[in-house]
Image (spheres, grey):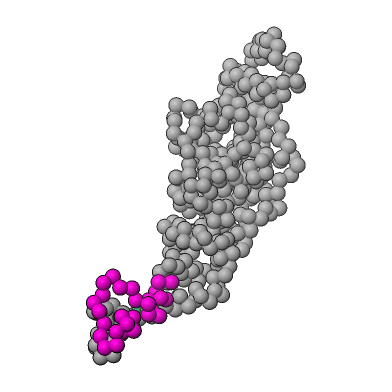
Amino acid sequence: MGVHDLWSVLEPAGSECCLKDLKGLKLAVDTSIWLFQGQVAGKHLHLRTMFWRVYGMIRSQIQPVFVTEGPTHPLKGTRGQVNNAMTSQIHEAGIILLEIICCQLLKALGVPVIESAGEGEATCAALNHVGVVDGVITEDSDAFLFGATVVYRHFSCDNRKAGQMKRYTMEDIKGKLKLERRTLVAYALMVGCDFTDGIPGVGKVAAVKLLESLKEEGDILERFHTWKDNKSLQLLEEHRNKKKPDHCRICAHAGTRMSHKSDGCGQCHLQDSCTKANDVTCSCDWHQMNEAFENQRYELDVRTKAKTPSGFPDQRVIDAFLEPSELHKLTDKDTKLQWSRPKLSAIKEVLSWAPVKDVLEMVTAYDMAEIRGNIDAAKDRIQPDWLVFVTIYLMCSY
Ligand SMILES: [Zn+2]
Ligand SMILES: [Zn+2]
Ligand SMILES: [Zn+2]
């Protein structure tokens, strides 16, 4: 799921946060992960989990928008297996039905639901990228590759579990780790993600070392494209198997001890001898080439391994992350999100056990958030007698 080992790379850029830090934010939720998390120890607790999380969010004056997963991306299909095990499980027949019921519940709670035509996290990221939402709640690290700017991981409504929820921003990733969105795509191409297996034999350590070594070399994806025909890299690659020529054991320069004794050493500037090595660096062709080789060793090692899968880098994978396809294009409806007041009767249709008191709390929190956002429009609702009236009416109805 997501990009292999990317969370551990991003870890130093993450910061702890809790629910109250999210007050007033609009957040896109990658719903498939919540559905998966609701399936605890074989028990279907999806609706219960969903209800209490949305309750916690609305009470904390967070405006969530839920994004559901679309069909599997064609690139995942070409890999001959469904790589996203979570997706495959969620889309089992029974779970699809549950997803429909969860969406019903969300709509009853007044929360907008967007049905993604592709990956849920990609649509969440697109919403975040254009500023429709302030952040994305997901466990999928590829949200950043799809353009998310703020991602919340390990979401929890429990303020007591301090330190559980983590906030990652692209700004911190750039500032602290010097990684850009395109660099993260390059990382995914090397180590593997939902769309590619990556380069055989290249893991997190090698990929990170390569990214660090090429920090000053311009756009990394463009660099990958030059690998095939890069003559200077090819020359350095040929050096890999070249045997080191004889070097004198006295002065450590190119040539044998015997030849230096009779003919002298050019680097020691002596015609019939040489001097004892004292931290001497040799400037022979082999050593010059070797220095250049060592400087680019990380890149050369990965480049050599990349020859195994033909056509590296796969432009289709790059496009899947960077070019919003028809699958992830946002419609006007997606960008004009409408939250509405939770409807107790509709909630009860899905959840017979729904606690009236807590729903009323949600209604009040919703109204307060709306009042805060639009004082003029909500003038009438500020009246305490209105709240009393609604509360009594709802209590008597149920
Ligand atoms: Zn010598
Ligand atoms: Zn010498
Ligand atoms: Zn040398």
Magenta span dominant secondary structure: loop
Q: Is residue 104 magenta?
A: no
The C terminus: image quadrant: top right
Q: Which residues, given as a range, are shown in magenta?
A: 265-292
Residue 102 % position (x, y): 61, 34
Residue occupying the point 71% across, 45% down: 330
Residue 369 % position (x, y): 65, 24
Residue 310 % position (x, y): 54, 71
Residue occupying the point 53% across, 49% down: 174
Q: How many marks?
A: 0
When asked about the image quadrant of residue 238, the answer is bottom left
In this image, 204 relative to 346: left or right? left
When asked about the image quadrant of residue 366, the answer is top right
In this image, 228 relative to 319: left or right? left
Residue occupying the point 34% across, 76% down: 282
Q: Is residue 315 visible?
A: yes
The quadrant of the rendered image in which ligand 3 is seen is: bottom left
Residue 218 higher or lower than 147, as above or below: below
Q: Kindly give the residue lying farthest to the bottom in the view shown.
A: 262
Q: Nearer the viewer, residue 41 or 207?
A: 207
